[in-house]
């Protein structure tokens, strides 16, 4: 039984495309992040802070900014730490992250959040919050390298 040259070419192309996809995923890496965010809100809120990305043994200073809208009030400071996954370089961390959710803390509280930016970088963060903050809102977070 003969296999046509057209079929062999198509099979080779599929294998090549699959190999490129696997190679792209294999090159993605991860790093760690630590930052703090001050947040104040009365229905519409704002947040800002700074921290550090550690990637391949190097430290990169980062700035944090954000907005929120919905049922939110209070003021707090949250210390976050965690991993950033699916990045190829430090610049992949920069971007706008979004998440919808709710939570709250009176006094000291804990938060857990997973957010993704447009480049596919995924933040997996845990945090501890100090202050009075109650929210059921949609939050946006922007990270930039300094």
Image: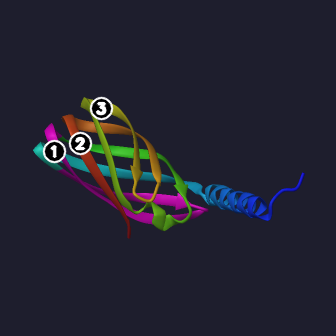
Magenta segment: 46-74
Does 45 sit above or below residue 4?
Answer: above
> Label 3 crowding class (10 Å Cα cut-off): few <14, some 14-19, many 20+?
few
Residue 13 on image: x %, y %: 70, 62
Q: Are marks 2 and 1 in contact (CB under 8 Å)?
A: yes
Residue in view at x 37 percent, y 61 percent: 95
Q: 8 or 28, which lies in front?
A: 8
Is 21 in the magenta? Answer: no
Residue 65 on image: x %, y %: 27, 58
Is 59 in the magenta? Answer: yes
**What's the mark number on residue 69?**
1
In the picture provided, is 107 more to the left or to the right than 42?
Answer: right
**What's the mark number on residue 108?**
3
Q: Mark 3 or mark 2: name the one nearer the start of the chain.
A: 3
Name the secondary structure under disc 2. strand
- Furthest toward the bottom, the residue is 146
Residue 33 on image: x %, y %: 47, 53
């Amino acid at each position: 039984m003969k296999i046509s040259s057209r079929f062999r070419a198509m099979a080779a192309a599929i294998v090549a495309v699959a190999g490129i996809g696997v190679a792209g995923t294999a090159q993605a890496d991860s790093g760690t992040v630590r930052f703090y965010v001050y947040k104040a809100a009365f229905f519409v809120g704002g947040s800002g802070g700074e921290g550090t990305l550690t990637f391949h043994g190097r430290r990169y200073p980062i700035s944090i900014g954000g907005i929120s809208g919905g049922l939110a009030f209070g003021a707090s400071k949250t210390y976050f730490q965690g991993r950033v996954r699916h990045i190829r370089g430090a610049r992949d961390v920069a971007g706008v992250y979004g998440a919808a959710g709710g939570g709250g803390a009176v006094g000291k509280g804990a938060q857990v959040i997973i957010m993704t930016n447009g480049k596919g970088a995924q933040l997996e963060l845990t945090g501890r919050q100090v202050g009075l903050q109650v929210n059921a809102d949609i939050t946006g977070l922007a990270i930039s390298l300094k």
